[in-house]
Image (spheres, rainbow, N blue to C red):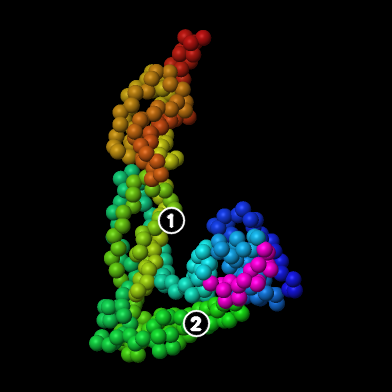
Amino acid sequence: MSAKRDYYEVLGVTKTSSLDEIKNQYRKLALKFHPDRNQSADAGEHFKEISEAYAILSDSEKKQTYDQHGHAGVDGKYSSDDIFQGRGGGGFNDIFESIFGRGGGGFTQQQQRGSDLLYQTTVTLEDVLHGKKMEINLQKQIKCDNCKGSGCKPGTNKKTCTTCNGQGEVRQTRNMGFASFVTAAPCPTCRGQGSMIETPCSNCKGQGRVKGNKKVDFEIPPGIDSGDYIVSNEGNEIPDGINGDLVIRVKVQPHRYFNRDGKDIFYDQDISMIDAALGCEINVPTLQGSEKIKVNSGSQPNTIIKLKGKGVSHINSRGTGDQYVRMVVNVPKKLSKHQKNLLGEFQKLSD
């Protein structure tokens, strides 16, 4: 790049842009052209150009001089070192830490997380109504009792890694001509841990955890559906890290008599055509026990009687559903001669 471009053009801002707008625009361009992320041949030149533009426009005094006299004003008044000092809009370190993490590189040490575990179970429709407390014996990775999760032989401790001096990362300084930037990567010696085990625990071989059994209590809530539910932190354990989760895969068993739709329960009640014609009182089952209902005279097949509040709750909504009882009128397939005569007489009287 020969002739210098206008600083406002370089950053894609205007003279009236606020300091925050200038900073945000520089952050986007720095992320795009930083040599650690952009491998094109001219990325370094672009990065230097936008950084110089930001250094001028983020400093109120330098910006005023540039607005009055252009490049001639700042090139004649400030050296390269002066340009990158005293930025009123916040230093480059603040911006690079927000983009790349501490130190300007891409490495940020994170806690390890244990893997999740899956447990499958079935529940009844009665369990959906009342909920169910469960206790299971779960085989999983647990903290080693012998070393209390340290991975070290009892009586010994971890040693600080001499390669990274306990930082867990190694840094490399790069001189970009106008400023120095530091990139960081996990330490290859301690694998980013910052310490090393010289004498491993004989029980866990230095892992800090072993395969074992643990009793886990959890509750199936009322109103549950078939699906996956999470019990937090009850998966595989990991020392100095975050435990995985226990995924409970629930299947609601079909009921012998009832069908469920959300909060509502449906039940088919067989009645004779005589009861449907004359009316009657009958007892019908519900999940809460037997309930007496009245069948009106002249009830037609598939008549629905609602039992309010005799359904179930639902985990994602309030209140309790209802039970709907459908009348299934049974017509006899075989009739005696006397029964046929009686029905014949009834038909004549109905005409």
| Range drawn in magenta | 69-85
Spatial distance from mark 1 to mark 2, Cα to Cα? 44 Å
Determine the residue positioned at 35% across, 84% down.
206
- Residue 30 can be seen in this image: no
Q: For the stretch drawn in magenta, what is the main secondary structure?
A: helix
Determine the residue positioned at 53% across, 83% down.
172
**Image quadrant of residue 322?**
top left
Determine the residue positioned at 74% across, 71% down.
3
Residue 83 vertical position relative to residue 320 in the rendered view, above or below = below
Element assignment for label 2: strand
Q: Which mark is residue 171?
A: 2
Residue 255, percent from left and from top: 39, 45
Q: In the image shown, does 342 or 131 lie closer to the viewer?
A: 131
Q: Earlier in the sequence, mark 1 or mark 2?
A: 2
**Image quadrant of residue 136?**
bottom left
* Residue occupied by mark 1: 228
- Amino acid residing under circle 2: Arg
Mark in front: 1 vs 2: 2
Residue 205, percent from left and from top: 35, 85
Left or right, residue 268 beside residue 41: left
Q: In the image shown, does 300 or 243 lie closer to the viewer?
A: 243
